[in-house]
Image (spheres, helix red, strand yellow):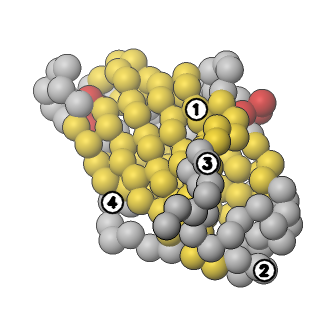
Amino acid sequence: MSLQTWQETLISAQVDGTALSNTTTATSILPAAAKFTLPANYMSIGKVLRVTAKGRISNVVTTPGNLTFEVRFGNTAVFSGGAIAISTTAHTNVTFIMDAMMTCRAIGASANLMGIGQFQTEALGATANIAVTSSLPVSAPAVGSNFDSTAAQVVDLFATWSVASASNSIQVHEYTLESLN
């Protein structure tokens, strides 16, 4: 039987996010206007949200380190992609696609989401013009940190480099947040 629901784009970025480079601090990679506030009590058991980000990534040769994506509700990481190993082959401004689907498992003051996704880019491999895909999270899937679904929550996408280098850079050009049901 149908759930009698519909898919809805909640927000999309209309401008580029600020490039994140030369830092190891977790930082939002979304433009301010693309941060959507979920209203209080919006989440329900089984509600699915999809975050999709696309843009460019560059990495330093030899020791680029790792890149971690987090979907946050306010300051709470409700989904973490884990530390993704970036290729030791230098890449400059190659395309990336990050996609994560998160399903609500609990609501209330201790609400949480189970999220699984993928990150695809040439910057994960050594061969030019060949995109490689990494599962997110890079380890076993796990429920994210608890959040209060009875309060409004600002949805944001953060990235963290493990090595600070001006050559390690990521910038979002397209972003959507969707409710799939």
What's the residue type where badge 3 is placed?
A: Trp
Q: Are marks 2 and 4 in contact (CB under 8 Å)?
A: no
Horizontal relation, residue 52 to residue 130: left or right:
right
The mark tally for this picture is: 4
- Residues packed near mark 3 inside 10 Å, few (<14), some (14 to 19) or many (20 plus): few
Mark positioned earlier in the residue sequence (2 or 3)? 3
Residue in the picture at 35% in, 21% down: 94
Tag in front: 1 or 3: 3
The answer to whether residue 148 is seen in the rendering is yes
Mark positioned earlier in the residue sequence (1 or 2)? 2
> x and y percent of residue 160 in the render?
52, 47
Q: Which mark is residue 175?
A: 1
Tag in front: 4 or 3: 3
Q: Which residue carries the number 2 mark? A: 109
Q: Which residue carries the number 4 mark? A: 138
User: Looking at this rendering, what residue extends furthest in the front direction?
Assistant: 1
Q: Relative to residue 128, is residue 137 depicted above or below?
A: below
Mark positioned earlier in the residue sequence (1 or 3)? 3
Residue in the picture at 77% in, 61% down: 42
Q: Which mark is residue 6?
A: 3
Residue in the picture at 47% in, 50% down: 100
User: Looking at this rendering, what residue extends furthest in the left direction?
Assistant: 127
Q: From mark 4 to mark 3, how far is it between C-alphas?
A: 30 Å
